[in-house]
Image: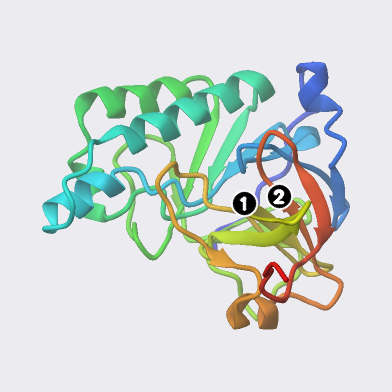
Amino acid sequence: MARGLSPLAPPRAVGKKQSMNRLAFDFHGAALAPLPSGALHWPAARTLVVSDLHLGKSARMSAGGGAALPPYDTRETLARLERDIAATAPARVICLGDSFDSGAIRAALPAEDRDRITDVQAGREWIWIEGNHDPGPADLGGTHRAELMLGPLTFRHIARADAAGEVSGHYHPKARLLLRGRAISRPCFLFDTVRLILPAYGAYTGGLFTHAPTLSRLMGAEAEAILCGATQMRLPMPRTEARRA
């Protein structure tokens, strides 16, 4: 296990919209703000957390004989990350694993994409947490960790049964529910008294619905979901498939 770090000094002032997120919640003593994009902001620690960027996914699928897809997913994901960094001004960014769709793709990223990653890293601490898609150190600057303890929280890629104050990713949670008689599906944050699971941040990623047995077993009975998107919603974690009557 990697040694823990201490939260940084109090944050610099950021935009009112970000600093007064109405869906902010307390998790093991840390006041956390889920952003519409799927990023998690921890203002007191000046930290932004993202999970499952899956950079290079379309290129990996095309190279493996799948459909020839334009490589726009990496650019869109990086643009989204640039916007969130500009809005929150973090001193630290934690990427919770599967930042790259494979180790080979990570090494083969176009120079333009590598330069953009270097640019967003400038002037801040950058931590790559190891995922199942991208084991091993990233040669793109920053620090590589298997997991990270920071204040009351532990950051890792995949949730563990013995968790406490755990922040993870991996499952790409999505909620499906009926809204005004229409079924909608959105990526979402899931949290209970033990763990917090982030949605996939990548522009071209699938997801696991919250009513899937894997997530239903993992999350406690009190678990809640916060849906991503321009209009965020907080509700009890959906555990049954939403179907119109």
The residue that mark 1 highlights is 186
Element assignment for label 2 = strand
Q: Residue at x 68, y 24 (%)?
A: 88
Residue at coordinates 27% horizontally, 55% vertically from top-left?
102
Which mark is drawn over residue 227? 2
Identify the secondary structure beneath mark 1. Answer: strand
Binning the other alpha carbons within 10 Å of mark 2 as few (below 14), some (14 to 19) or many (20 upward) gives many
**Residue 169, percent from left and from top:** 56, 59
Q: Position of residue 159 (x, y in %)?
A: 60, 71
142 lies above or below 118: below
Q: Which residue occupies 12% across, 51% down? A: 63
> Looking at the picture, which amino acid does disc 2 mark?
Leu
Q: 193 or 142, which is in the foreground? A: 193
Write down the quadrant of residue 178 in the picture. Answer: bottom right
Mark 2 or mark 1: which comes first in sequence?
A: 1
Where residue 82 sits in the image (x, y, percent)?
51, 24
Q: Are marks 2 and 1 in contact (CB under 8 Å)?
A: yes
Image side of residue 236 versus residue 4, left or right: right
